[in-house]
Image: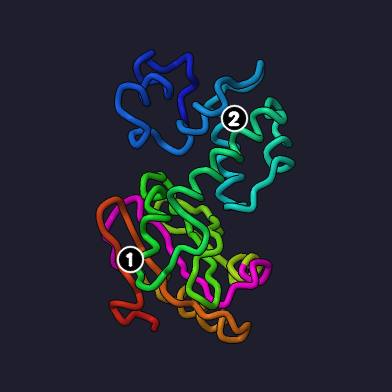
Amino acid sequence: MNKSISQMHESDRPREKLLRKGAQALSDIELLAVLLGKGTVGMDVMTLAGNLARLIDEKGLKVTAEDLSQFEGVGDAKATLILAAIEFARRRIKPEGAKIETPADLLPHVRHYADRKQEHFLCATINGANELLNIRVVSIGLVDRSPVHPREVFADAVADRACAVMLAHNHPTGPLHPSDADIETTQRLRAAGDIMGIAVLDHLIFNRTDYFSFLEEGKAF
């Protein structure tokens, strides 16, 4: 659970931490807290930022002002600030049409999930030119597993008119080698993709420093 701002030492609060250590030292929730500035009377800014982070995980680049403003304390000003920050970063750092030609090409776009305490199962949708369309969190699980169903993976892929997807999930603890459940899930999703005409190109397991590629290692592919 995230500490409230009042529980933090002043030097560890998001804004002060950013000035002291740089933006790269902040978690996703801390970065959102800096953008929000403050919470509401009934909700600390860190709690509000955590709620928004989960929503943005689910929506990816298709998050809207209406999505954000459903939360108390997020009006037009804060919603537009967050959307502007996302769009600016997308244009400068993750431009539309980023090519995914090798498994490692996806890593810069998902590596920030490596610090999450729970396993996050991600789906990256890709068009016919191998260009990245969107990345969404499909499922959040326990520390060592994240249950996922084909309908959750392919619903957004269909909406994006994707030709293919790449799967990925972080390993908060333990080795990167896939479990039997990881292999079974990958095989099941590949089979579902074949039926739908949406190729599953790879499944990455990653942490902060390394990754495992099902495709490169010949597992389930």
Q: Quadrant of residue 52?
A: top right
Q: Horizontal and vertical percent for residue 44?
A: 57, 21
Residue 31 sits inside the magenta stretch: no
Taking depth in this image into account, of 46 and 34 the one nearest to the observer is: 34
Taking depth in this image into account, of 36 and 58 the one nearest to the observer is: 36
Q: Which residues are magenta?
A: 157-177
Q: Quadrant of residue 19?
A: top left
In which quadrant of the rendered image does the C terminus lie? bottom left
Left or right position of 96 against 27? right
User: Please, what is the three-letter code of the amino acid marked with disc 1?
Assistant: Ala
Residue count near mark 1 (Cα–Cα under 10 Å), binned few <14, some 14–19, many ≥20 = some
Give the foreground label among 2 and 1: 1
Q: Horizontal and vertical percent for residue 29?
A: 48, 35
User: Please, what is the three-letter code of the amino acid marked with disc 2?
Assistant: Leu
In the image, what residue occupies the spot 42% across and 55% down?
Answer: 109
Alpha carbon distance from label 2 to label 1: 33 Å
Q: Horizontal and vertical percent for residue 99?
A: 43, 67
Q: Horizontal and vertical percent for residue 172?
A: 35, 50
Residue 48, which numbered label? Answer: 2
Residue 104, which numbered label? Answer: 1
